[in-house]
Amino acid sequence: MKKAITLFASAALVTAMSATAGAKTLVFCSEGSPEGFNPSFYTAGTTFDATSRQIFNKLVEFERGSTTIVPGLAESWTVSDNGLVYTFKLRKGVSFHSNKSFKPKRNFNADDVIFSIDRQRLDSHPFHAVSGGSYEYWNGMGMTDAVKEVNKLDDYTVQIVLNSPEAPFLANLAMDFASIMSAEYADKMMAAGTPEVVDNLPIGTGPFAFVDYQKDSQIRYKANAKYWAGKAPIDRLVFSITPDASVRYAKMKAGECHVMPYPNPADLDSMAKDDSINLMSQEGLNVGYLAFNTQKPPFDNKLVRQALSYAIDKQAIMDAVFQGSGKIAKNPIPPTIWSYNDDVKDYGYNPAKAKELLAQAGFAGGFKTNVWAMPVQRPYNPNAKRMAELIQADWAAVGVTSDVVSYEWGEYLARSKAGEHDTVLLGWTGDNGDPDNFLYVLLSCDGVGGSNRAQFCNKDFDSLLISAKKTSNMKERTALYEEAQLLFKEEAPWVTIAHSVVYKPVSKNVIDFKIDPFGGHSFYGVDLK
Amino acid sequence: MIAFILRRVGMIIPTFIGITLLTFSLIHMIPGDPITVMAGERGVSDVRRAELEAQFGLDKPLYQQYLTYIGNIAQGDFGKSLITKEPVLDEFITLFPATMELSLFAAIFAIAIGLPLGIIAAVRRGSVFDHSVMTISLTGYSMPIFWWGLLLIILFSVILGWTPVSGRISALYWVDTVTGFMLIDAWISDEEGAFTSAVQHLILPSIVLGTIPLAVIARMTRSSMLEVLGEDFIRTARAKGLSPIKVIMKHALRNALIPVVTVIGLQIGILLSGAILTETIFAWPGIGRWLLESIHRRDYQVVQGGILIIATMIILINLLVDVLYGVINPRIRHAS
């Protein structure tokens, strides 16, 4: 009855952000529901936000707001001269979270590292098949082929031996799928006959402990008071799942959330003017491109590719398609990645030069082709259809007529993988901040028939990439990638179009939020006024 | 009577098989598959694809997949989500209370306002009130829900600050899930103010979801009332000198309600099958949004299983109504 009276007394007035307790609660209006709570099963950023970025640590981590690798659960590491043996010294005195069914009896040690890696690596591991275990990132990053053995030297020393030198390996270990989980928890749940609980009620060492998940509605966390790097400044963290971008913005304005991802580009202007919102921005770790099918005539001819690169007015695309949320790309890797070669000279907009090159290639009268446009929105391409139409018009001006083609997303990916297109619009978002993750995946001979939509296989270019994989000497790697970018530009398998600019509307009450170059959201170190 | 019920139940089986065939073929006809969607730009190697197909049972011919699916359903197994790996039935049971809670309030809103509006419009036929009710209900019926929801949010939540924007309860209240009905869970929790917050969160989505049923109910009530008001027994009642209120409420309304109740029943059936748009705008964790997301992800199991569960529910409601009609009206019982 008392509650009914309070209800009527308070009529319809909302006391949105004030109320209850003295606990500092940060609300993040996330864009969707996590697929699950074990980050090694999935590839979606939404899932990583809800899991690895709050609950777990990795052996090595990316420094907050950058792509630099810093110590995580490993205090230090060494790499053997031949690049094959990685030895990690583990941090002592790190405790795991606890929940209703599990109170850890020991601190984090080498067994947890072995468990977390071997579960994904070995088909015979008792936990490999638990929860339908499919380790998409582990497989996708080629880890099974890369890792030869994982050894425990003592409780706080782990050694990983590789089959061949693979310089990006360390960066891979900082990725979400490499989150370290508790072997003790796994053993206990296995003994209780409910091993899948490990994946539904996560236990980690991270700055926030999982409290509960109300499906499609809210995820709740509390700060880990015993966090090894010090307790987070906020006490509670809530993910309020809000799929519509306009509604997320309304919630920001009404003070119902502190941080929101993926604003509508159309709302950016009014967000910038809003006194209660701090509109942060950074270049994203991605690239949007147009790939020529280099195995199909006339695009097997370098001159034709160069000509059509000259024919495109990229600035017009920035204005019409990105409306401030993109920057012109000249390299296949974004400027936030090390080894980005700023000396590369882009093909400027030059229709006369384009015609000249086409004539030189024997296509003075032009030809007919197609431009494939993605059916989905991506940060690196917010409106592929519009982009394709602009390209179509630019090319028509130099005598090349084209049809704009589109398919349902799954179909689009499958057909372009098979090389059915003449030219195709697509893009890529980086996984681990390593140039290899862009160049090798998207442009190596190995990638032909896979992620290499240009079907581009150039022996000189490929050998540069392979040499860069084999050495862990940063200086050498940088030089090799810089050279590769020059060669890429000369060969022009793609027209590099844009790197997106990521916008993050954050409430003015939020202190020290940093944009993650990987597109994620982590709330350790963030405070509220 | 028993023969009648058996006949009705017997008719369910072909309907049921029809639904399974339809959902199965429709979802498989949509281009793309769960593995491609999951992998995105990243792609997946052919070896890995084959492994995953085997794991998901997608490597078998379609008719075999269908038979396995039917076989499992016969044993009460609606399958597991390909993405979350949770049993479809469990996910449904988790999310259904949210849909039910919202449907209930939307229905109350629609009936409480639609019914009186319809009655008054009929009684004052041809008046300004009548015309405005008819115009407004037509507008309500043709309202684009997404636009309507956002409009109300901007007005009441952002500008006036009277109601919260979305969700089921303020993020500041940590209410444990006991029944899945937020009002009940908030009421029994120790958190001061949680119940109020839950009620406030129900207001806008109930209005938005109730708008179309309200319009339908108001128009149906009006036309049904008009028909009844022209009948002889109403004239007789009036001639007897009964008060106009008594004539309308006791004699006219009772008879006019029969078709209205049928319409209300149908509307509630529709509400319960989940409101994709309303649930998306208000970030309401119900089954409409669940199914939509599963279609995007090509989560075959959830789409097939989820639709089947909803269809079963609607079939059972209809069966119940049919049987009740038969109980009330012997003519129906004996007709077939």
Image (spheres, coloured by chain):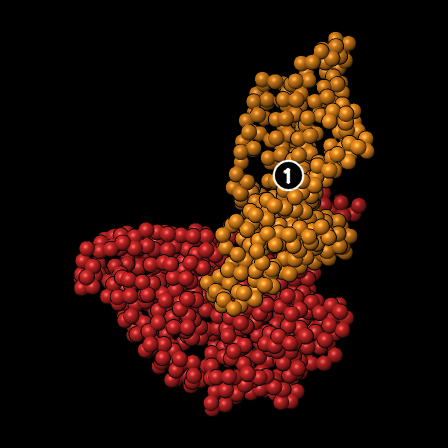
Mark 1 Cα-neighbour bin, 10 Å: few <14, some 14–19, many ≥20: some
Amino acid on which disc 1 is placed: Ile
Identify the chain drawn in orange.
B
- Indicate the position of residue A90 as horizontal and vertical percent values: 61, 84
Q: Is residue A319 visible?
A: no
Left or right of A465? Residue A234 is: right
Locate the N terminus of chain B by quadrant: top right
Identify the chain drawn in red.
A
Residue shown at the point (59%, 68%) measured from the top left: A134
Left or right of A459? Residue A8 is: right
Near-viewer residue (A77 or A488): A488
- Indicate the position of residue A143 as horizontal and vertical percent values: 53, 76
Residue shown at the point (68%, 57%) measured from the top left: B87
Locate the C terminus of chain B by quadrant: top right
Near-viewer residue (A214 or B289): B289
Judged from this view, the residue extending furthest toward the right is B2
Q: Which residue is mark 1?
A: B270
**Quadrant of residue A241 within the rendered picture:** bottom right
- Indicate the position of residue A422 as horizontal and vertical percent values: 33, 59
Residue shown at the point (70%, 74%) measured from the top left: A186
Judged from this view, the residue extending furthest toward the top is B239
Would you place residue A16 above or below residue A95 in this image?
above
